[in-house]
Image: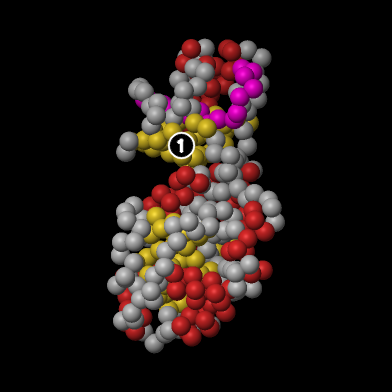
Amino acid sequence: MPQGRVTDAAEAVAGQSPVPFRFSMLTYQIIQGGDPMQGYEKPRVIALGYFDGVHRGHQALMEKAVERAKQIGGTSAVFTFDVHPDSVVLGRQVPLLTANAYRREEIKKLGGVDEVIFGHFDEKMQHMDWRDFIHKMLIGQFGARWIISGRNNRFGYKGQGNADGMAVECEKAGIGYDCIDDVLVDGIVVSSTYIRQLISQGDMEGAAHFLGHPYTVTGVVEHGRKVGTSVLKVPTVNLRLPAEMALPPYGVYAARVLVDGQSYIAATNIGVKPTFVDGGAPTIEPHLLDFAGDLYGKLIHVELHKFLRPERQFESVEALRAAIAENVQQTRDFFS
C-alpha cells in the first residue's frame, strides 16, 4: 500500500471537525509540559508504537508525525504504553532503553513531538478489539486525524491489528495514515531487541549507532560511602541503576556526564565494587575529569560511550588505584 495515501489531501483532514474528546485521567496520561486538555481541538497526528526509549526507528515515526502535523496545522503526538504489553500478556518484564521516569523527556527531546500519551496497558487493553482501538480510542478519545505506524506494528487483541488493517480503517474514517517501513542500519533492522543485545554485550558504540545517540543513564546524584574520595582519592558521584533498564555488563566505561548545561568526560564504574565488600545494590559511579564541585541532588545524564574493562576484585587498594589511573587515561584518549 503506498505510504501516506489514504485521503485525498492533507487539507481535507485539517478541515474536519474534531470527534468529541473524552479523557479519562485514570486510564490515560497526556504529558506535554502543560494543561493536558490544552490544544486538543487541533487535529492530532499520532505516532503509534511502544517507545521504550528512542532509537532510529522511533525517530522515523516521530519525524513523519511532526511533518504531517505541520502540513495540517495540527499537534504531533506519540501514543505508547506505560508498561510493555509482554509484561501483561506473557508475565515477563522487558528491559527499557531509558528509565521510566525520563521516558517522556527523552521522547520529546529526541523526537520533537508536542505530546506524549501514555496508555495504561492492562487486561482490558489486552482484550480490546483492534478496530475499537483505532476508532474508539485513537480517533474517538484522542482526536487522531492522522496516524503513523511501523510496517510490523501489531495492536489489539492477540495482535490482530496490523498496518494493512490500519490503512483500511483510517480510509473508512476519512483520516490520514502513513506506514513507515523498517529502518535499516548496516543492513540490520533497527529494533529494541537488537539494541538490548548490543548493550548486554557491552557494545556501547554499536548500541549508539542503532539508537542514533549514546546509551544514557539518567538520575539524581545520591550520597555514597565516599570510598572514592576518602580511600582512593578519586571522587565519584553516585547514581542508582534503574532496575527497569537494559543494563550493560559490570565494568568501567568511558562516559560523558551532562549536568546544568555543561559536559564532562568521566571514567565510570558500573557494578557492586567487589574490592570493597558492602553488599549494596549495583550503582553507576562517574569520576568526572577536570571537575571540582558538589553535585549532590543534581539530575545528571551519563552517556556510556565505550566499555573499557570488566569489573573485578583487586588484591589491594594500590592495584585498584593504578587501574583507575589507566582507565582515566583511556577515557581521555577516547575523547581526544
Q: Kindly identify which residue carries mark 1.
A: 219
Extreme-bottom residue of the structure: 8
Q: Quadrant of residue 126?
A: bottom right
Q: Is residue 333 above or below residue 57?
A: above
Magenta: main secondary structure equals loop
Q: Nearer the viewer, residue 185 or 166?
A: 166
Left or right of 263 on screen, residue 269: right
Residue 134 percent across, percent down from the top left: 51, 74
Q: Is residue 160 visible in this depiction of the protein?
A: yes
Which residue is rendered at x = 31% and y = 81% of the image? Answer: 15
Q: How many marks?
A: 1
| Residue 112 seen in the figure | no
The quarter in which the C terminus is drawn is top left
The residue at the point 69 percent across, 52 percent down is 91
Q: Decide: is 221 above or below 17.
A: above
Q: Residue at x 42, y 80 (%)?
A: 175
Identify the amino acid type marked 1.
Answer: Gly
Locate residue 231, reporting x and y percent: 52, 12
Q: Residues within 10 Å of mark 1 (few under 14, many from 20)?
A: many
Residue 236 higher or lower than 159, as above or below: above
Along the horizontal axis of the image, is 41 left or right of 127? Answer: left
* Magenta span contains residue 281: yes
Q: Measured from the top left, where is residue 273 in percent x and y?
A: 60, 23
Q: Is residue 194 magenta?
A: no
- Side (left or right) of 90 relative to 39: right
Residue visible at 41% across and 49% down?
A: 105
The front one of 19 and 15 is 19
Picture coordinates of residue 115, whole percent (x, y): 38, 59
Q: Looking at the rendering, which quadrant does residue 221 occupy?
A: top left
Report the span colored magenta: 275-291
Secondary structure type for disc 1: strand
